[in-house]
Image (cartoon, coloured by chain):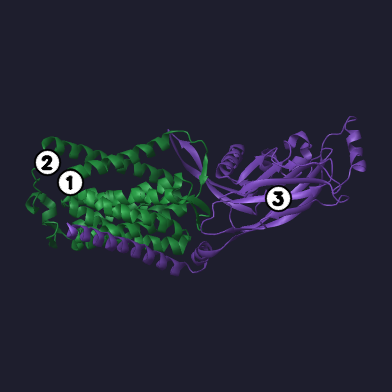
Amino acid sequence: MMKPRSLSLLSFPLLLLPLFAPTAAALEPAKLQITPSTVELGTFYGGARMHVAGMAGAGCKIIVVVRGPSATEVFNKLGRVGPIWVNTGKVTISAAPSLLLIFSSEPVNTFLISAAIDQYQLDLGSLKKHMLIETKAPDRDRVADDFLAFKAHQGTYGIIPRSVQMTVPDQGGLPFSVDFEMPRAATPGKYQVSVLECRNGEVTTKSDVDLEVVEIGFPALIARLAKERASLYGIISIIIAMVAGFGIDFLVFHIFRRKVAAH
Amino acid sequence: MWILLPVAGMSIRLPVLVGVGALVGFLSGMFGVSGGFLLTPILMMIGIPPTVAAASDSCQIVAGSSSGAAAHFRLGNVDVKIGSVLLLGGLAGAAVGVRIIKVLRALGSADFAITLTYVVVLGTIGGYMFFESLQNLRRGALVPKSRRGPAEQGLLSRLPLQMNFPLSQVRHSVFVPFVLGGIVGILAAIMGVGGGFIMLPMMVYLLRMPMHKAVGTSLFQILFTSAGVTFLQATTNHTVDLMLAILLAAGSTIGAQIGARVSRQLRGDQLKILLATVVLVVMVKMALGLLMTPSLQITPAGGH
């Protein structure tokens, strides 16, 4: 989705660069390994330590992108009515990933041209351009900024420069790695981990690996029951709550009665 | 230790959830309120989506109120007779309230109406209870207050189907608790809460029930209404997070037991002034939330 750019004599040599620079098709994709390859959301899930490692071509800059599936999210829009703030309508945001973490060896804008940043959505500005916002509110830009701030606060959006570790190149290429914490708010789904090798302001190679985030055990059972057997789930919830309430009352009553009897 | 909430789709620290549950359960057991007006905003503050917070809250209220109601029942504080009439009125009122909300939503002014109702109702009830209890405490409320007899209640005493409620030592037409229950049901449906904090002052000031009987009876009624709401939320919105509800309930059931015991050590007016303070603090917090410019002008949709 490159935008047409005005050409000038000064920019002419840049047009020749791709002829000499390796392209995404010409280069071997980076060898990539992600550990663990599946994130299991069990009862005590509180985030997961992730390790991405690979081998890239010598002399390149590296960007690692973790992207969740696109989701449609609905928000209330707050507006001022007289002196007070109330909900004034709904905002629906789609075509935005549920999770987006961007790690790079250096700040992305120091080694990539803006067209490439925009194409691969590697900064907040390019994310704002690509997301679809349905709202009657006139200040769409403010809505987009607030959405990004909300996701950052939630821990699901983050741009972390200088987080990709690169070691000394050897004969096999340039070893790189990044360690990060999978957010606590990660939802189940098929995620994609991409490694972008960048040279001369462009992305020359892109390698993708799938990352599964799955619910297991008791949380998986609850989530399935809540969706598929709603009536049964409702009744079970009430029974468990009542048993817990009366059970605690029974226990406390007998403990206190014994204490009173002992005195 | 972190715990995954599968319906909310996020992880929360275990002690935070149990602690929040215990605090709200303590208030529930002490004052006979469900605590929903307090718990839902707290859950939203710690990042739980509003719809999940409201629905799971009603599920944990089932646990907290059954624990509190059982403790009060043993203490002889649950008036099942008047509680049943209030419950029937409350269910009828809730059905009307849901209709009103639908109309307001269609007109686009539901949120404004809900928020304003909250501030006005909380402010009126909290303010009245606070100053009335303060006056009684200053006068020295050790002397039991005389409750007005049916002859002094004017028009109300002439209504048909007069009935004795011996446990609460009051006599009313069956229509009085039914209509009061209905009014509370309407307000509770509009505000999206159990309604205990509205019901309790109504029981004390309008039905003239003794404070401790009102607390136990209110919990008895809340148990049934919150069970109904939990079922509806589970089947229509799929937003009841059982894991969240269980952990909140673990705290709230213990808190409710302690609250019920602490309430026995306090006089009615002392209980009232404490409840009034809690209600007024929530009202002030909501009023500030209405007036102060929010840092983000979008909030996750759902709930109120």
Q: Chain of mark 3?
A: A
Q: Nearer the viewer, residue A234 or A220?
A: A220
Q: Position of residue B297 (x, y in %)?
A: 52, 39
Q: Is residue A203 above or below residue B228?
A: above
Q: Chain of mark 1?
A: B
Q: Which residue is mark 1?
A: B268
Q: Chain of mark 2?
A: B
Q: Is residue A252 visible?
A: yes
**What's the amino acid at mark 1?**
Gly
Residue B141's disc is 2
Query: For residue B244, what is the image quadrant?
Result: bottom left
Q: Position of residue A246 (x, y in %)?
A: 30, 63
Q: Colour of chain B?
A: green
Marks 1 and 2 close (CB-CB < 8 Å): yes
Label 1 or label 2, whichever comes before in sequence order: 2
Q: Taking B183 as reference, is B77 left or right?
A: left
Q: Position of residue B57 (x, y in %)?
A: 39, 54
